[in-house]
Amino acid sequence: MNPKRSANRRYKKDLILEKAIEVFAKKGSQQTTISDIAKAAKIAQGTIYVYFNSKEALLNECMQEIIGPVLQSIIDATKDIPDTMDRLFEFFIQHIRLVEEKPYIARFLTIEARQNEDFYESFPNYNPLRCYLDFVESITEQAISEKRIRAIDSKAFAILLVGAMDFAMSEWLIQENKMDIADVAKSVREILKFGINE
């Protein structure tokens, strides 16, 4: 295939994926049609079928090609920070940037699995927040081994932190008067740093 044609095909496929995520996030995958996605991408409906043979195949590729790499990029952005607790805070900040810069991805992460009862049955190996949980648990265990923090249940702590992030993201998405999630992150950092005892 000639390079120009190949680049054009890649561009069109990426466009379809990006617009599909936006529409899935807004309407939910169950209510979304191929026609809705075609309208959002300003292309013919038949063009989508050149790249994807069904809405389910398109949804699956959205998760694999867009959601997965975006989440991994948040984790990768912290890798050069030597202090484990600073890494955790930067992880939280990077997640906030995702919510603010790409709210459609945040909305998809927050809403899709809750709205679609068949979501995990259709995609049993997909849990968008699992990599977050694994990352926080790993960093927590590292902080314990370095005696940066006291010995705690790293799995429970990961659930606590990622759960707080998920809830803050949900609240930000549904509120008309947006709360300042950067302020929430700073408060979480203070709690992580100093605990809750007087």
Image (cartoon, grey):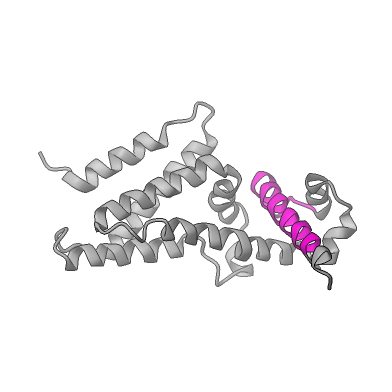
Q: Is residue 176 left or right of residue 93?
A: right
Q: Residue at x 55, y 67 (%)?
A: 126
Task: Measuring from the top left, give residue 81's x and y in whole percent.
Answer: 31, 56
Tell me, yes or no, whether the highlighted magenta stretch contains residue 76: no
Q: Residue at x 38, y 52 (%)?
A: 91
Q: Is residue 12 left or right of residue 124?
A: right
Q: Please give the range of residues in magenta.
A: 7-33
Location of residue 69 with respect to 193 vertically, above or below? below
Q: As rendered, which of 186 and 15 lies closer to the eye?
A: 15
Q: Quadrant of the C terminus?
A: top left
Q: Residue at x 84, y 51 (%)?
A: 35
Task: Measuring from the top left, give residue 150's x and y in whole percent.
Answer: 14, 60
Location of residue 4 with respect to 195 vertically, above or below? below
Q: Main secondary structure of the magenta part?
A: helix
Tell me, yes or no, whether the highlighted magenta stretch contains residue 17: yes
**Is residue 33 at all visible to an observer of this figure?**
yes
Task: Measuring from the top left, give residue 64's x and y in whole percent.
Answer: 61, 66
- Considering every residue shown, the one lying at the far top of the view is 177
